[in-house]
Amino acid sequence: MTQTNPPRQKIQRRPVHGVLLLDKPLGLSSNQALQKAKWLLRADKAGHTGTLDPLATGVLPLCFGAATKFSQLQLDADKTYEAVLLLGQKTSTGDAEGEVIQTRAIPAVTPELLAAVAQRFTGPLAQVPPMYSALKKDGKALYEYARKGIEVEREARHITIFKLEMALAQDPRAPVAIKIIASCSKGTYIRTLGEDIGEALGCGAHLGSLRRIETGGFTAAQCVTLAALEAMTETDREACLLPPQSLLAAYPAVTLDADNAARFSSGVRRRGQWGDDAPLVQVHGGAPAVFLGSAQITADELIPQRLLSSVEINDIVQSAGRAAKVFVPLSMATASVLTDAGSL
């Protein structure tokens, strides 16, 4: 008699709102890490804020529920990476995963030489994306062409390296290694930067390791690992979430009274003395104040951009255990109605 395995129990998904700062482990893609965290939280909606290669570790903000509306801010954010360059060898992928395609002698590398090279690669740069990347060409990722030995033309991207620190390091995989810390604009490929530094030194190089240590103001010290999450109770996992407005922490805040909050959340512009013109502000309101979404200020008008729904707001209030009163802007006729969150 053939034994059959019992069907897997379906996970009951639920609304989860917030930002999880994950320290992505080595070997997992960003999406694999996201799906694991989503499963652990039983979240029904989630997204990440820009990919990290499987061979990279570090800060990966994951957005859940209402926070996904503001994930683009992290996609566009400046980032800081820590990497180890292995000198003397170029690989097919620009990192330790690829095959060695060239070996050259390594010159004497001094702190003075590193300082000069670092200065050369600091500031605005034009960088050609690597073939082993997820960028699309005619609907296919570049790495798909690369795996078939096909090289396609890529346009250079304009990036900025705000700060670049370089120092000699010890690594058993190479006779000479360099540790770099690079603060850069979005779209920067550290593998390509590493290869370019290797060429500037005259010996070639490839990445031995890569770690993102900061993105958009979030640092590795704030992150939690998947292993730690797995060991937690569901309540403790939820406690790791930052509120959705943490994605807008760098922007000024506007707080509205209950009536203006209800109308604003219905998508209505509000006139008032909101301060100087600003392309982006975070908006709070109600009694007590809750996060409503984002807006811009132009000529004393507060113009809604990305808004939380009343359902999302009340989910967040209830999950925080607050017996707060928030507005429920179901229509313009009921826009100013305040209702007890616990009764929804």
Image (cartoon, helix red, strand yellow):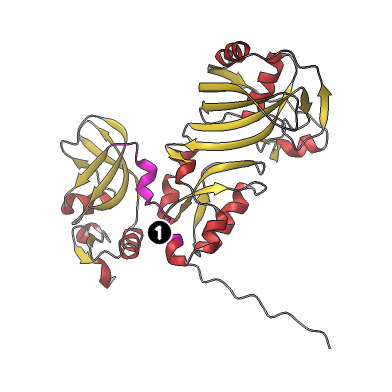
The residue carrying mark 1 is 239
Instruction: Say whether residue 224 is left or right of residue 171.
Output: left
Amino acid bearing label 1: Ala
Left or right of 332? Residue 208 is right
Residue 240 among magenta residues: yes
In the displayed structure, 302 sits above or below 194; it is below
Task: Provide residue 127's location: percent of width, then percent of height.
Answer: 62, 22
The magenta stretch spans residue 100: no
The residue shown at (83%, 33%) is 149
**Number of numbered discs:** 1
Q: On the rendered image, what quadrant is the C terminus found in?
A: bottom left
Q: Residue at x 66, y 38 (%)?
A: 134
Q: Nearer the viewer, residue 234 or 334?
A: 234
Q: Residue 297: give x, y in percent of width and height.
A: 26, 35
Find numbered disc 1 in the image and state the secondary structure of the residue it sits on: helix
Residue drawn at the location 83% of the way across and 37% of the way down: 148
Identify the residue shown where x is 29% and y is 49%: 267
Instruction: Find residue 39 and report its image quarter.
Output: bottom right
Span of residues in magenta: 237-252
Q: Where is residue 226 in the image (x, y as percent from the top left)?
A: 56, 55
